[in-house]
Amino acid sequence: QVQLVESGGGLVQPGGSLRLSCAVSDSIFAFDVLGWYRQVPGKQRESVASSFRRGSPKYSDSVQGRFTISRDFGKDTVDLQMNNLKPEDTGVYYCYGERMTPSGIKDPYWGQGTQVTVSS
């Protein structure tokens, strides 16, 4: 079973930066999508940034220009560099991966989440 393990969360002041990393227990070459979601209490989990096997990454409007997603094929990680953090970026960040089974079915994977708190 493939595992996704996040790290790098914590407490940061507004305007600060954090870098999240998601270690994947299998080769990330096999993943069509690798991304990051955010969840706050009482709200649905929302996509923040996605990296695709083909094509450009996608970002939510709220983080566009501040967050950057990247894949490290040597380490089998997907990272999220978060700059100019705002209090509304606070939440639990989940790593997400998706690959296709041989029969053509999407096979999703989730990490356990890491807390990011932006507060002065």
Image (tube, rainbow, N blue to C red):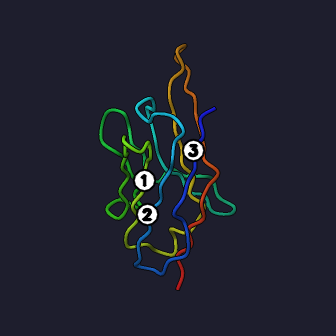
Asked which secondary structure carries label 3, the reply is strand
Residue drawn where x is 60% and y is 43% of the image: 110
**Image position, residue 51 (x, y; %):** 39, 43
Decide: is 22 above or below 3: below
Circle nearer the N terminus (2, 1) = 2
Q: Identify the disc placed on residue 91.
A: none
**Image position, residue 2 (x, y; %):** 59, 35
| Disc 2 to disc 1: CB gap under 8 Å | yes
Decide: is 102 above or below 33: above
**Image position, residue 41 (x, y; %):** 68, 63
Which residue is identified by label 1?
79
In the displayed orientation, state which residue is furthest to the right. 42
Residue drawn where x is 37% and y is 40% of the image: 73
**Image position, residue 22 (x, y; %):** 50, 50
Alpha carbons under labels 2 and 1: distance apart: 7 Å
Q: Quadrant of the N terminus?
A: top right
Decide: is 76 above or below 9: above
Which residue is identified by label 3?
4
